Image: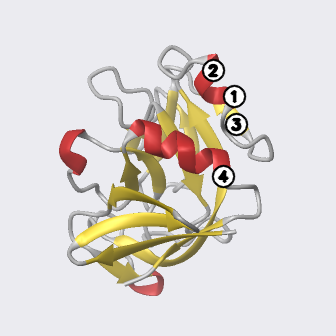
Amino acid sequence: MEIIVQNINGKWQASYRDKTWACTIGKNGTIAAQNKIEGDGKTPIGKWAIQKVLYRADRISLTDRAVINQSLEIFPLSQRDGWCDEPEDPYYNQAVIIPYTSRFEYLWRDQENTYDLIAILNYNLDPIISGRGSAIFMHVAKPGLSPTEGCIALERNNLLELLSLVTSTSEINIIE
């Protein structure tokens, strides 16, 4: 199964069969994966599997979690979860426990809901190439589908619906 993420008539969308969801991507558009650079605000073109799903148990109900396809690995977030985005760090583009000595992103965010539900895409994970981009996720969009730093974002209920359809062998295909 393949979810296609593409720009149709100036609007980004994710689609599968007869389902289509509005989405957003990086604030600076797309880039060939081999040219991606940490912090460029671009979404890497290519096919990326969902490695696992993370969620905030205090914001994503048991009922909502139950719709996520059971073939996906799903784990609760904690307040100490982070993601290293420092290219020189040995844990670059990997989950870390906060406090952490290098630069990282907080995965537990109190002031916004973007990381209430995160599908970790397998971009730059096997192997990890330093500086090639980190934390490329599919997550909850900010209001108005404002652009991301390189991730794909959908409205919360649309992301839940998409995650109900994908399996552990599905790929997210980002095309120009």
Total number of numbered discs in the rendering = 4
Point 26% across, 73% down: residue: 29
Q: Please, is residue 48 above or below residue 107 in the view?
A: below
Q: Which mark is residue 66?
A: 1
The type of colouring in the image is: secondary structure
- Quadrant containing the C terminus is bottom left
Q: Residue 63 carries which label?
A: 2
The residue most toward the right is 71
- Whether the residues at callouts 1 and 2 have beta carbons within 8 Å, the answer is yes
Of callouts 2 and 3, the N-terminal one:
2
- Whether the residues at callouts 4 and 1 have beta carbons within 8 Å, the answer is no
Point 55% across, 44% down: residue: 161
Element type where label 2 sits in the image: helix
Direction from residue 90 to residue 23 in the image, left or right: left
Compare residues 60 and 134 and report the one nearer the observer. 60
Q: Please, is residue 43 above or below residue 140 in the view?
A: below
Of callouts 2 and 4, the N-terminal one:
2
Residue beneath disc 4:
165
- Quadrant containing the N terminus is bottom right
Q: Residue type at mark 1?
A: Ala
Direction from residue 176 to residue 170 in the image, left or right: right
Label 3 crowd (10 A; few <14 / some 14-19 / many >=20): some
Compare residues 148 and 87 and report the one nearer the observer. 148
Label 1 crowd (10 A; few <14 / some 14-19 / many >=20): few
Q: Residue type at mark 2?
A: Thr
Asked whether residue 106 appears in the rendered view, the answer is: no
Q: Residue type at mark 3?
A: Ile
Element type where label 1 sits in the image: helix
Element type where label 4 sits in the image: helix
Label 4 crowd (10 A; few <14 / some 14-19 / many >=20): some
Q: Residue 74 carries which label?
A: 3
